Amino acid sequence: MTSRRRRFRDKVIAGIAAVAAGFGILVVSAAVPGCGVTMDDEARILELVERLRALAENRDTAAIMELIHEDYEDFQGRNRDKARSFIEDHFRRYRGIVIHLLKAEVGEEVEAEIREVRIDVLLSSGIAETLRRAVRFAGETYRIELTVVRDVRDEWRILGASWRPVASDDMLPGSLETLNELFPDVIRNIF
């Protein structure tokens, strides 16, 4: 792969990951008793993540922004306004974003009304999604780490986000099993 193509691919994946930051859960780990997260809190946080995933696939920037806290900042220093521009730019440039949700863990309370969420996702878009079986390409796996906060209306919002590629040996427990269920013919040949 040429360096130009690699840079283009990296920009596409980074954009998809940015849009997907926090967007989804398929399999949810149970809350650990005494960890500071009630099942109600966990369920509401995971509902937020699922809504964001669906909105990203539907390219609904306005609705996504309603779920992002006014004090949002991602790991690259983008505030809420810059995140909106970044998302809109990627929606204009890339079609067919697909976010396969693999596994999530809602962590302990890090401060009053603030939780950390770790999510493994499989991202693909456009022709890669359409042809994934024929070309044996499942997509790119990412770890998304979110900070969520309960706002004054008692709603959970995304306060911060980071993402990075994740190798199969660093995935959350259960992620590979979910991948195998989603893509049995593809995953068997990749991992």
Image (cartoon, rainbow, N blue to C red):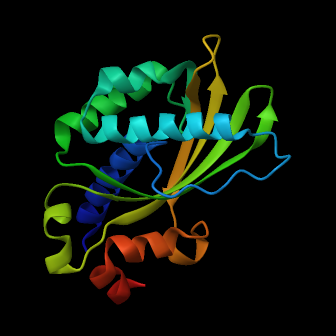
Q: Looking at the picture, how far across and down is residue 6, in whole percent?
A: 30, 64
| Figure check: 45 above or below 174 | above
Q: Looking at the picture, how far across and down is residue 70, in whole percent?
A: 54, 16
The residue shown at (53%, 38%) is 76
Q: How many marks?
A: 0
Q: Determine the residue located farthest toward the right in the rendered image.
A: 34
- Horizontal side, residue 8 vs residue 174: left or right: left
The residue shown at (28%, 84%) is 185
Q: Nearer the viewer, residue 131 or 33?
A: 33
Is residue 75 something that shows in the picture? no
The residue shown at (40%, 48%) is 17
Locate residue 83: give its quadrant. top left
Is residue 28 something that shows in the picture? yes
Q: Looking at the picture, how far across and down is residue 177, in whole percent?
A: 48, 75
The residue shown at (49%, 74%) is 176
Of the 4 image quadrants, the one containing the N terminus is bottom left
Q: Nearer the viewer, residue 136 or 26?
A: 26
Q: Determine the residue located farthest toward the top in the rendered image.
A: 152
| Figure check: 51 above or below 70 | below
- Horizontal side, residue 166 vs residue 6: left or right: right
Q: Determine the residue located farthest toward the bottom in the rendered image.
A: 189
- Horizontal side, residue 93 vs residue 157: left or right: left
| Figure check: 144 above or below 169 | above
- Horizontal side, residue 97 vs residue 14: left or right: left
Of the 4 image quadrants, the one containing the C terminus is bottom left
Q: Looking at the picture, how far across and down is residue 142, in whole percent?
A: 47, 59
